[in-house]
Image: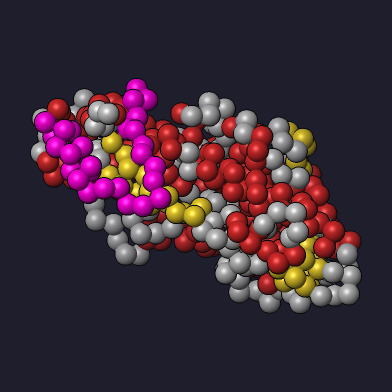
Amino acid sequence: MSHRNKLKILNDPIYGFITIPDALIFDLIEHPYFQRLRRITQLGLTYLVYPGAYHTRFHHALGAMHLMGKAVRILRSKGHLITEEEEQAVNIAILLHDIGHGPFSHALENSIVPGIKHEKLSLEFMKALNQEFDGRLELAIQIFTNQYPKKFLHQLISSQLDMDRLDYLRRDCFYTGVSEGQVNSERLITMLNVADDQLVVDSKGIYSVEKFIVARRLMYWQVYLHKTVLSAEFLLIKILSRARAVYNEQMIIPSVLKRFIRENLPAEYSSLLPYYAQLDDYDIMSAIKEWQHHDDPVLSMLCKSLLKRKLLGAYISNTLPDHTLVQNIRECVASRYGIRHEDTAFLVFNEALTNNAYDPQRHRINLLYRDGSLQDIALAADQLNISALAQPVTKHFLFYPKECWPKG
C-alpha cells in the first residue's frame, strides 16, 4: 500500500473529519494491539445507567490525537518550536496512551493484572511496538515517560489540562447525554501557551478553565462515580475475585481469560503482553454468562445480578458505615441465601472513593499574563471558588443486596 493511501480521513461524531497525519500512525492504528481498543468500552459498565455510553477506547484515542494536532498548531503559531519529528512523536504518544487498558477500562483496573496500572502496560505495549517498527517510537516513548527535554510535550499528554482529559470529558458528555459536563475544548486549546518549558493558559482563558474544572467535578459525581455505575463495576470486580477463589479445571472460561484467572501472574508483566493483548470485554461477558450456572452460589448470584441488572444497593455517607449495620446485613444475606458468613463479603462491602477535580500538587494550571507573570488558577479565579474544588472530597459507599436493608 502506498504512503498516499495511508492518509485516511475518519468521520468522528464529536469533531467531524479526523485526518490520520502520516503512514506510521496509520500502521499503528491498523495494528492488532490498537484494534483491540474497539472492543474495550470507554466507560466500563456505565451503559447500564446511561444507555448511550457504548463508546470505546478506540474512539477516545483517535479523538485525543486529533486534539493534539490542534494543540501543536496553536503552540507553533505562538512561536514555540515543535519539529516534525516531535509532532509525530507526541501524536503517537497520545494515540497509544490508553493502549494498556484492559476489559471495561477502569472498572477492572488492578483486577485482571493485580497491582499493575494501565499506564505501565501501555508503556510495555509501546516498547513492543517500537521493536516491531524498528525503533521509530523511541522519541514517543521518551515524551510519554517524561524523559524528553521539552517537558511541555509530556504535559500535553498527561497533566491537569491535557488532550486526554479534553477529549474524554467532551466525548463522555456526548455519549451519556449529561450536558453538565460540556467543555469548550476548541477554546481551551486556542488559549494554550508555553512558559518556562511548562504548559500554561493565556490569562484571557480563565473562565474556560474554570468551566473545565467545574465540568470535571460534575462528571465525576454524576457519571464516573454514580452510585449505580459503581454498584455494577464493583460487582464485576467481585465476580473475578470469586472466580479465582473457586477456580477448578472443569470451570468453563474463555481460553484467553483462563491464564489470568488460574495462574499466579509473573512479576515480569511484559511477558503477559501476547495474552493480555487478546483480552477484551467480550471475554469477560462470555465467562459471566457461563458462570451464572456455576454450582458455587455466590459466584452464580453475582453473575445473575449483573446480567439481569439486579444490582446491589448503595448507601452513601461521609463516614465509615456503622459496624453493627454491616454485620446485621451480612447475617441477613447469610440466612436468606444460605451462604457462609465469611462469603457475605462478596455481597456486602464498603468502598471509599475520592473526587478531586483539580489537584495542584500534581501539575498546576497556571495562567500567563501579558507581563509574563504566572498565577495558579485556584488563586486567580474570581467567579467560582476553584480553590474549594481543589480540596478532595471522600464519600463512603456501602454496597448490599437490597432485600437485606433493615426495614424502617
Q: Residue 46: where, in percent of width, then height?
A: 49, 34
Residue drawn 19% across and 45% down?
A: 324
Q: Which quadrant of the rendered structure holds the N terminus?
A: top right
Residue drawn 17% across and 33% down?
A: 333
Residue 326 among magenta residues: yes
The quarter of the displayed image where residue 58 is located: top right
The quarter of the displayed image where residue 280 is located: top left
Side (left or right) of 249 relative to 137: left
Side (left or right) of 89 relative to 187: left
Q: Which quadrant of the rendered structure holds the C terminus?
A: top left
**Is 135 rendered above or below residue 400?**
below
Can residue 247 be seen in this snapshot?
A: no
Front-lying residue, 261 or 3: 261
Residue drawn 85% across and 69% down?
A: 369
Residue 315 among magenta residues: yes
Side (left or right) of 240 relative to 154: left
The quarter of the displayed image where residue 229 is located: top left
Q: Residue 19: where, in percent of width, then height?
A: 76, 43
Q: Residue 184: where, in percent of width, then height?
A: 76, 45
**Is 357 rendered above or below residue 325?**
below
Can residue 404 be seen in this snapshot?
A: yes
Front-lying residue, 253 or 297: 297
Q: Which residues are magenta?
A: 306-335
Side (left or right) of 117 relative to 22: left
Q: How many numbered marks have been drawn onto this rendered protein structure?
A: 0
